[in-house]
Amino acid sequence: MDNHGFFGAAIAKGIALSSEHDIVLVAGKGHEDYQELEGIKYPFSDREIVQELLAA
């Protein structure tokens, strides 16, 4: 997750702060697999980030 920046860190923090009966809603880019910053598209998938974090 090192290269996922602010958005990946925000998702990770939300999951880390959650308890067993909590619901973590990631209302992000949905179907898009990139994050565009200053006209540059960087690979990024909310879905993949969540899967990586839950598998760890």
Image (cartoon, helix red, strand yellow):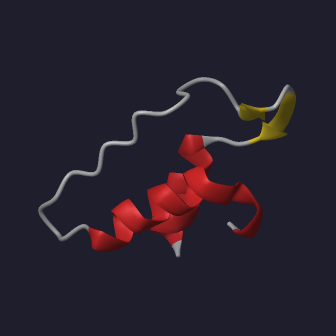
Instruction: Give the answer, above or below, for where 44 lies relative to 15.
Output: above
Q: Nearer the viewer, residue 54 or 41?
A: 41
- Direction left: furthest residue: 21
User: Viewed as shown, does residue 5 lie left or right of 39?
Assistant: left
The part of the image, by quadrant, that contains residue 20 is: bottom left
> Which residue is pictured at 29% across the width and 71% down the height?
17
* Picture mark count: 0
Residue 55 is situated, as x and y percent measured from the top left of the image, at: 51, 69
> Which residue is pictured at 82% across the width and 40% down the height?
42
Q: Quadrant of the N terminus?
A: bottom right
- Direction front: furthest residue: 38
Q: Nearer the viewer, residue 20 or 42?
A: 42
Instruction: Give the answer, above or below, for where 9 lies relative to 49.
Output: below
Residue 9 is situated, as x and y percent measured from the top left of the image, at: 55, 62
> Which residue is pictured at 56% across the width and 43% down the height?
46
Q: Nearer the viewer, residue 34 or 6?
A: 6
Q: Nearer the viewer, residue 49 or 39?
A: 39
User: Viewed as shown, does residue 15 lie left or right of 47?
Assistant: left
Instruction: Give the answer, above or below, for where 21 lies relative to 50.
Output: below
User: Viewed as shown, does residue 21 lie left or right of 8?
Assistant: left
Residue 47 is situated, as x and y percent measured from the top left of the image, at: 55, 43
- Direction right: furthest residue: 40
Residue 44 is situated, as x and y percent measured from the top left of the image, at: 71, 42
User: Viewed as shown, does residue 22 lie left or right of 33?
Assistant: left
